[in-house]
Amino acid sequence: MTEFGYAGEILKVDLSDGKITRLPTADYADRFPGGKGIAAKLYWDMVPPQAKAFDPANCLICTSGPVAGFTGFASSRWLACGKSAAGNPEAFCYGNLGGSWGNRLKYAGYDGIVVQGKAEKPVYLFVHDGTVEIRDASHLRGKSAFEASDSLKAELGKAVSVLTIGQAAENLVVFATLLADEGASGSGGIGSVMGSKMLKAIAVAGGKKPKAADPERLSKLAEHVRTLTRGPLPPFWWVIPGRTKTQACHGCGIGCTRQSYVDEKGNRFKCFCQQIDIYRRPAERYYNGWNEVILLAMRLCDQYGLDASVMQAMIEWLIRCYKEGVLRDEDTGLPLSKIGGPEFIEALTRKIALREGFGDMLAQGTIKAAEAVGGRARDLISYSVMNSSNEVKDYDPRLVLHNALLIATETRRPLQQVHEASGFLIGWLDWLDGMEGAHLSPEVISKIADRYWGSAAAADYSSYEGKALAAKNIQDRTYAMESLILCNARWPMLYNPLTENNVLGPDLASQIFSAVTGRESDEGEMDRTGERAFNLQRAILMRQGWGGREGDRLLDYLHDEPMQYLRFNRKCIVPGKDGEVTSRKGGVVDRAEFEKMKDEYYELRGWDVASGRQTKAKLEELQLGDIAADLESRGLLKQE
């Protein structure tokens, strides 16, 4: 079962008693190819539903996928999961990372690692050549993520790949991140889960590379993928001419617009979309143009371990509070009058990471901070905050109705999902503007909608019709990609101007999976694995008190406050019926229509429409009979 594509074992370390065990990957890979699915099953098996995010019983779970370690497929992504305190309520959550650490973990002999318990003092794990060591990390306590990584490489050798945390995670800031080599950062509050265990870092090294079942077929597929992805990528705002250069993740073989730059000391740092937007607009207003403080803000967040998405939304909220006189310098101990300059971002990141003064309140997230301040501060979160996990508002469901259910049924902003319909909308805007090389005409979007979203009706962004089916299809496909794991910057490959009719044919991902593992699969079966993984996550959430239909909700303002503009689409225009240009300006997610979407979505999922609970029949159909039995024993399954 796991001879090809997998390392063959999953490592489990209990920091409370030092016990180290090894689990056969084959016990999980029969139903879940890897990544998101295996991580969810490990969590289901090991974390009691009543465990809190910072309890020793919670687990930090890191998993790669079967395609990790094979060059040419943008497959070096990996996941970090656990119960997170980032949202309200606490819930199972995840971060998706790139770089090299996921591949290196597999080279060290493991498809995943589970850390449970809590050490008595700071420790780090050293996983190498079949050996697992729990070592003292007292000398690393209080160091930034950059400093800790550099110290461990000096101590263990440059061949190791290091996953670590900064001061924010040590101090249990709820939106603290993980940081791995090449600037790979993991959000979703998983950094503070690692910090709660007194675990400063996991260093991995090894030379056990995976084998493919059909190397010749895999090589041909890699060449085909290179053909489909050849040619220059369009310019983006995080590409700084003369300052940044392209930096692909380890073994990617394709590349994207991920950039890096070198500072005055010769250190290399990443420069990418979300990260650069932490402070870009405030700095450009402050300096009337580009300033190096934009890069400083990125470095500060990474060194302390602060989620860029949450920080961007928080800074925008603070700007509004300051402009309206809700918060002042003397109220917060922050130089709010200097937002955009270095003084403010240095003070803000330090105070949050160290939980000093007003920073201690902000360390709980923007929504809780706004509630604590009260009054007008609560209203102003709608300016920038998307969801209960305090992430920034960007792919607004009032503009892209496809995204409403995607956001409502997840514990965090599901970027890999909301990118799909939003990305096609951005491509359509380029086509509308006559940009050279833009191909996403209404006709192409209609073909994509019919082929991948379930109906051509989903190509009409002004209507609720077809959006429930589109949401289900997007989720199933994305969960399959996050099980292999393939990078969302390139996958799923639904559209390509080099192919006939611009729409790709048989799913490449299933072919790659088959060539790697020797397990024949097709597009339908691959989507089925995604549906299975998504239903397992749903079961986890239900067991934690998600509440079914009641839990599937958006923040109130998305229903109540008419949308005025979005930064990437200020006129709020979308392709409407028959491809006509239509404006969603002034639109909301209508509550009645949203509930109808839920009805249709639950029916498509095979869940109970009235409650949003899963059914025994559906779970058994998905080979999740054991999950159904557990839910049934707890009264969480809809009785038929």
Image: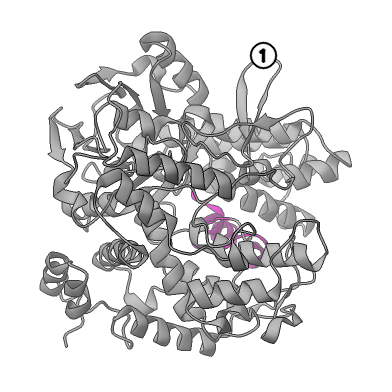
The residue at the point 46 percent across, 58 percent down is 412
SS state under label 1: loop
- Counting from the top left corner in percent of width and height, residue 224 is at 50, 47
- The extreme right residue here reads 288
Is residue 378 something one can see in this rendering?
no
Q: Which percent across, then down, holds residue 292?
A: 77, 30
Q: Which residues are magenta?
A: 363-391
Question: Which quadrant does the C terminus fall into?
Answer: bottom left
In magenta segment, residue 372:
yes
User: The disc labelled 1 sits on which kind of residue?
Assistant: Lys
| Residue 623 visible within the image | yes
Q: Nearer the viewer, residue 524 or 467?
A: 524
Tell me which residue sits at (55%, 75%) in the image: 449
Q: Mark 1 sits on what residue?
A: 265
User: How far across and down, in percent of the image, does residue 220 sit?
Assistant: 43, 43
In the rendered view, would you say 381 is above or below 171?
below
- Camera-side residue of 139 and 131: 131
Q: Position of residue 117 (x, y in %)?
A: 21, 37
Report whether 592 appears left or right of 218: right
Q: Quadrant of residue 552?
A: bottom left
Q: Is residue 33 magenta?
A: no
In the rendered view, does 392 fall on the left or right side of 516?
Answer: right
Quadrant in the rendering for residue 37:
bottom left
Number of residue marks: 1
